Image (tube, rainbow, N blue to C red):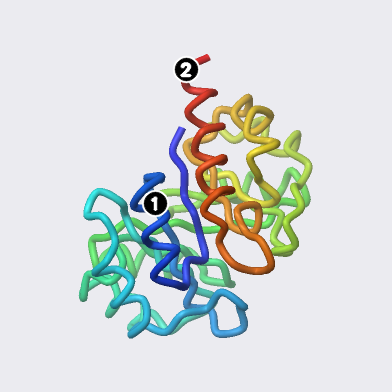
Amino acid sequence: MKVKMCGLTRTEDIAAVNECRPDYIGFVFAQKSKRAVTPEQAAVLRRLLDKDIQAVGVFVDEPLSNVAALLYSGVIDIAQLHGQEDDAYIRQLQAETHCPVIKAFRIHTAQEAAKAQNSPADMILLDAGAGDGKTFDWSLIQYVTRPYFLAGGLSPENVQAAAALHPYALDVSSGIETNGHKDKEKMTAFMNAVRKEEIL
């Protein structure tokens, strides 16, 4: 089970992930997000990131050319789309960049889970969608058979329950924060909880 720690904004966040070693980190480029970074800030942080950790760029209805530019430059390895990007947008981005694309889906109904199942994206992310640190009804995704990132309300305390769903990866953000900033102790606790599940 992989781990993605999303919404990194500071050099100390990078130092923490280099130490606790998730598989992916996320830079948020959606300007309305409290965790947003500029391309220039992300480039600086990326240079400090361990080369074995992949960087994901999180976008909301961003012009395709802007996303592609960040992929071409190597600031990010993977694009994660959280807006109304349709299948045509996804296919065009894949064709132009030859880089993996993750499409995020807010899961409130079984129909939304089915739409995620059929997405042309390389990977899918299933989320509560509100960004409020709450989980969604995980029973809605019991018939999703393709690998997925599970997001929304994850923390060291519910890693065991999340692992029972056998997701490809866990995507955590607010669950490893204190007062709106990444907390190294919580980040380490999250990774330790995941590694414990892998041993059991």
- Say if residue 70 shows up in the picture: yes
Asked where in the image residue 167 lies, by quadrant, the reply is top right
- Label 1 neighbour load within 10 Å: few <14, some 14-19, many 20+: many
Q: Position of residue 139 (x, y in %)?
A: 75, 34
Local SS, label 1 = strand
* Residue at x 50% of width, y 52% of height: 119
Question: In the figure, 109 relative to 142: above or below?
Answer: below
Q: Which residue is mark 2?
A: 199
Q: Nearer the viewer, residue 35 or 48?
A: 48
Q: Would residue 165 be found to the left or right of residue 30 on screen?
A: right
Q: Is residue 96 visible?
A: no
Q: Residue furthest top?
A: 200
Q: Can you identify the residue that label 1 sits on? A: 24
The residue that appears at 47% across and 50% down in the rendered structure is: 4
Q: Secondary structure at mark 2?
A: helix
Q: Looking at the image, tell me whether mark 2 or mark 1 is earlier in sequence order.
A: 1
Front-most of residues 11 and 39: 11
| Whether label 2 touches label 1, CB < 8 Å | no
Vertical placement of residue 71 versus 156, above or below = below
**Image depth: mark 2 or mark 1 in front:** 2
Q: Residues within 10 Å of mark 2 (few under 14, many from 20)?
A: few
Amino acid type assigned to the residue bearing label 1 in the image: Tyr
- For the residues marked 2 and 1, what is the alpha-carbon distance in whole angstroms? 21 Å
In percent of width and height, residue 21 lies at: 37, 45
Say above or below: 20 vs 73: above
Residue visible at 75% across and 62% down?
Answer: 132
Q: Of the numbered discs in the image, which one, if any, rests on residue 105?
A: none
Residue type at mark 2?
Ile
The residue lying at 51 percent from left, 59 percent from top is: 6
